Image (spheres, helix red, strand yellow):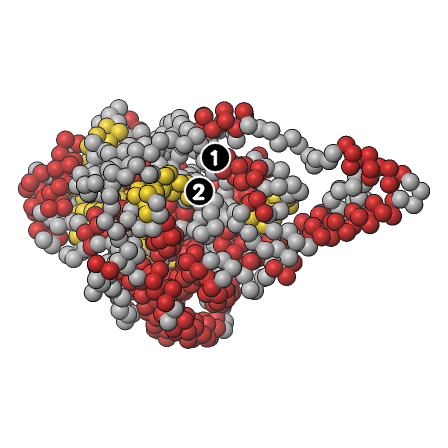
Amino acid sequence: MLDQNKTTRVEMDWSGPERLQMNMGPQHPSAHGVFRAIVTLEGETVVAVDAVIGYLHRCHEKLSETLTYAQYPSIASKTDYVAAMTSEFAYVMAAEEIGKFEVPKRAQYLRVIVAELQRIASHLLWLGTWCMDMGGALGGGATIFLYCIRERELVLDLFEALVGARLLYGFFQVGGTRYDIPDGWAQQCRQTIDVIESRIEEYEQMLEDNAFFLARAKGVGIVSRELALDVGIAGPLLRGSGIDYDIRRNAPYSSYQDFDFTVPTEQDGDCYARYKVRMQEFRQAVAIIRQALDKLPAGPISSRPALKSVAQIRIPKGEAYARVEGPRGEVGSYIVSDGSAKPYRMKWRGASFSNLAILPHIIPGHKVADVVAIMGSVDPVFGEVDR
Amino acid sequence: MALNDPPVPVIPAPIWRNFKELQEWEELHKTRPEGDKHSPVFESLTEGIHNFPGGFVVTTAADAFLNWARKSSVWPVTFGLACCAIEMMATFCSRFDVERLGMVPWASPRHSDLMIVSGTVTIKMAPMLLRIYDQMPDPKWAVSMGSCANSGGPFRHGYHVVKGVDRVIPVDVYVPGCPPPPESLLNGLLLLQDQIAHFKKTGRKAPPNEKVD
Amino acid sequence: MNGEQARASLASTFGVDIAAGVPLVVTVAPEQWEALARYARDTVGCLFFNFLTAVDWKEQGLEVVARVDNLEENVGLMLKTKLGPGVTSCASLTPVYRGADWMERECFDMFGIHFDHHPDLRRILLEDGWEGHPLLKSYAVDTPHPPYR
């Protein structure tokens, strides 16, 4: 258990007159996207954080009311653009739940494989950018960044062979998936995940023997259990604070119950705990992919006919909220349908939006340098925050 | 001093929080004139050298040399806004290296030559983008990466999206794609290098090149 | 308490019919909104605040929808309240759940719903000086906004 007395929190004298308000503007080198934090500093310690978001508000929810269920999934991938597959997954699952469409078994397994590969790719990017934030872009941080991007390119090659696009796909379709795996893809996939598994061991060793990394990650950004539940954060942040909840296991969707995997949980709630959770998630994702490739059934990839017109998919009146365990947490899509080809109201429950709401609660008390480490371990993607 | 509960922070609105005030402030402070600035002494000097018999060798050689120096060391300011930023980061990494072209991604706009606008420009972000562009010293170039920066992209019909970054800053190269894969971005950057090679420095205009014009 | 117990106790305490299923959908009048949230957190044990949003039903007015979860028992609760036609204010859930803070700011930004007793109700996604509330059905998706048209 973490010794609360040896953390970086200091007892604050809130009555001090030397307050400085500093702007960590929408453009800053800690590569997370457009986020503005107005921090109130007392010396080197942060006293308050006002997070200003909305610099990437691209009107997803309003646009989804003008786009049909066939057109929107490729736009949906642009919310969480680092993990585009899980974003599309939530939207398509909600539409299928309202319309009560059956998804064939092969499509479910393909969705699982693709979602887990996306989890690996997203965590690789997270590790690279977090270490780059903490280590500096010209120094040690860039080492891990370049290694992780090298591995991520292997996964993106798989996606390019499958879908045709590297980053933003239109792979999901209401009723199943749009493409089937080409020949030789399963073999390439197995080789890729073998390589990634061995390299993850290497990175863990590299990082955990590094005293600077441990000093910057241990004891920093502690999220208590009750704060985590109250604010509504999810994913590795929740599991790093000791709450053992994973949608894939607790409320399984798309045949996740057929696979055997554990859900890593850590008790400490600091950046190091979240790091350990995500490193374990790599291994679990690799295990799930192996099982899915072994058990992949033959069959159709979609229960709906192939798309020939944009208004082809009509969903009866109703509403549903479908959620997916994305790499950042719970990505959900709440669709209210009025019986036409377009949704009446679509709400994105973005994982990063809820995760970011925790920053004003946990950053005060830390030093300025910890702000970057904490933000990196929260891992926001601003497409999801601002939608 | 007594230790008590942290107060709820009262943060005064900075000038750019209120959009209307920002618009007025921008109008008042719009001082950057268009085009490249040359002093009249320098202009007359180069004119003199060029008009001297045989002097054109000096000016064209100086042009070529300076442009070669400029295009071989274009430093982009890391201005990643959205999804294209991930592809831009992939371009900067080992597989599609841009450092072999001399491009070192640099976070500070004051030390950079190029702004790669990667991602959707929203109405809230546009003044910040203009501010960063203004902080870059001359000569500077801008590459619009991705369809959102080119024209608003898939979000063109949104109320909060600027329909193309060329409504905010002048753009030199447009790279299409959603997101453009690193090969496309590299193509765009190489075209930009060709454009820079024709950059007017000593007052002479280059002949049109069918690749860029 | 688990799903069936939650359904029975909510139906009896608030006098509403709740259909069986996942998640449980509870619709109450706006006056009972905060009491319902408190009951969900304290008695039903839904400590996890998932999201809060609104739906614009044109003539029938706005409807505020929230979802809270009980992670141990795997109970999901959809709380709904219809604020009648023309009503744009609602009780805030921030005294009950801290996560309602940003979600209610977003509802205010997008729908114009004013949440009473919210500590800091200002626009979150759009600028402070923005006119109009975009997700209302009366707002066109491509409303031009100067100076970028």
Q: Quadrant of the C terminus of chain A?
A: top left
Name the image quarter holding residue C27. Answer: top left
Q: Chain of mark 2?
A: A
Q: Give x and y (percent) for residue A252.
A: 26, 61
Q: Which residue is mark 1?
A: B123
**Residue A233 higher or lower than A64, as above or below:** below
**Residue A170 higher or lower than A120, as above or below:** above
Q: What type is the residue that disc 1 sits on?
A: Ile
Q: What type is the residue that disc 2 sits on?
A: Gly
Residue at 28% across / 48% down in the picture? Answer: A365
Residue A52 in view: no
> In the figure, is residue B131 to the left or right of B200?
left
Q: Residues within 10 Å of mark 2 (few under 14, many from 20)?
A: some
Q: Give x and y (percent) for residue B34.
A: 66, 32
Residue at 74% across / 34% down in the picture? Answer: B39
Question: What is the residue that sits farthest to the front in this orientation?
Answer: B1
Residue in the foreground of this view, choosing between A88 and A287: A287
Q: Residues within 10 Å of mark 1 (few under 14, many from 20)?
A: many
Residue B134 in view: yes
**Residue A262 higher or lower than B23, as above or below:** below
Q: Which residue is mark 2?
A: A25
Circle 1: element type: loop
Between the residue at mark 2 and the residue at mark 1, the CA separation in whole angstroms equals 16 Å
Residue at 57% across / 28% down in the picture? Answer: B30
**Residue A220 higher or lower than A344, as above or below:** below
Q: Quadrant of the N terminus of chain A?
A: bottom left
> In the figure, is residue C70 to the left or right of B165?
left
**Residue B168, disc:** none
Q: Foreground mark, 2 or 1?
A: 2
Residue at 16% across / 57% down in the picture? Answer: C72
Q: Give x and y (percent) for residue C132.
A: 38, 27
